[in-house]
């Protein structure tokens, strides 16, 4: 059998890689990556909030959230709650700030703006506006937690027992006694491996900074559930009636076999917002 002439081989090769075939292949390549400083909009409790891509992540404008959903709360209340929840606020650059101004998220007179992730925005708003109900966890579920205050200790945080800020929901792994979260961080056991760390002054909210999951390699679902538990009974319970109906984007169901960084710097300014 004679071999196919070169031009015919090339024609067959071109036919197999026609523009339509390339387009079909491109359709299976998945969504395009986020572009730096890309501006978009998302809904939070039914309210449109401007997003900006920073370091490969979509972040929401904290100032816009404070002026819409959380406008009945003071700057200090929002700041303290954010720090207590371990939410890091990333400051935008002058170029990014100008993009937020043009998108109507920030007033022209603004000089800075803090940005948080969508998940962090959900947690922050839920701590003010959501019901103080525990996340949906398996029966008899407990978080294995540790603190390093004084000589440190380890215990089991039982969400089913956490029905108030003073509930004795942590069982010490050393003495099997039960403590409330704010008392447990002042309860310690000296071991041969422990090092003494001066504890903070008694602060009802300080346990959220010091009490951590023993296994830091838990799944995202476990970390998210832990964040939701820490958001309960955190400060006042004042609520406002939302101006719009609808359930928003918050998903109350958690998959369990769910985070944020440290307190961080940052802040935001209040001002008129164009909706």
Image (spheres, helix red, strand yellow):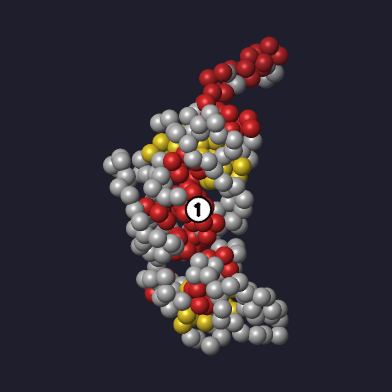
- Residue 141 image point, x, y percent: 43, 71
Which residue is at a point 59% across and 79% down the rendered structure image? 153
Q: In this orientation, which residue lies closer to the viewer: 217 or 175? A: 175
Which residue is at a point 62% across and 17% down the rendered structure image? 14
> Hey, which quadrant is residue 55 in on the image?
top right
Which residue is at a point 49% across and 49% down the rendered structure image? 75
Number of labels in the image equals 1
Say above or below: 184 vs 77. below
For this view, does 75 lie left or right of residue 92?
left
Q: In this orientation, which residue lies closer to the viewer: 47 or 18? A: 47
Say above or below: 236 vs 51. below
Residue 31 appears in the rendering: no
Residue 134 appears in the rendering: yes
Quadrant placement of the N terminus: top right
- At label 1, counting other C-alpha atoms closer than 10 Å, the crowd grade (few under 14, some 14-19, many 20 or more) is few
Residue that badge 1 annotates: 76
Q: Which residue appears farthest toward the bottom when viewing the image?
A: 175
Q: Which residue appears farthest toward the top when viewing the image?
A: 7
- Residue 269 image point, x, y percent: 53, 41
Q: Name the secondary structure under disc 1.
A: helix
């Amino acid at each position: 059998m004679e071999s196919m002439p070169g031009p015919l081989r090339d024609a067959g090769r071109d036919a197999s890689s026609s523009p339509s075939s390339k387009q079909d292949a491109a359709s299976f390549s998945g969504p395009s990556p986020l572009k730096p400083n890309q501006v978009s909009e998302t809904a939070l409790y039914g309210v449109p909030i401007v997003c900006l891509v920073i370091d490969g992540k979509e972040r929401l404008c904290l100032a816009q959230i404070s002026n819409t959903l959380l406008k009945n709360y003071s700057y200090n209340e929002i700041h303290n709650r954010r720090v207590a929840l371990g939410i890091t606020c990333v400051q935008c650059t002058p170029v990014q700030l100008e993009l937020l101004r043009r998108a109507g998220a920030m007033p022209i007179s603004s000089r800075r703006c803090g940005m948080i992730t969508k998940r962090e925005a959900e947690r922050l708003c839920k701590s003010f506006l959501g019901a103080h109900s525990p996340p949906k966890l398996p029966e008899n579920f407990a978080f294995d937690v540790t603190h390093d205050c004084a000589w440190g200790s380890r215990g089991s945080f039982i969400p089913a027992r956490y029905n108030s800020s003073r509930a004795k929901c942590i069982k010490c792994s050393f003495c099997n006694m039960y403590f409330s979260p704010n008392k447990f961080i002042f309860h310690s056991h000296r071991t041969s491996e422990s090092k003494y760390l001066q504890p903070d002054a008694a602060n009802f909210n300080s346990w959220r900074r010091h009490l951590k999951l023993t296994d830091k390699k838990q799944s995202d679902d476990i970390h998210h559930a832990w964040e939701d538990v820490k958001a309960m009974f955190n400060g006042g319970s004042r609520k406002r009636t939302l101006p719009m109906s609808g359930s928003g984007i918050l998903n109350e169901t958690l998959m369990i076999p769910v985070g944020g960084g440290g307190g961080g710097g940052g802040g935001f300014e209040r001002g008129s917002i164009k909706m």
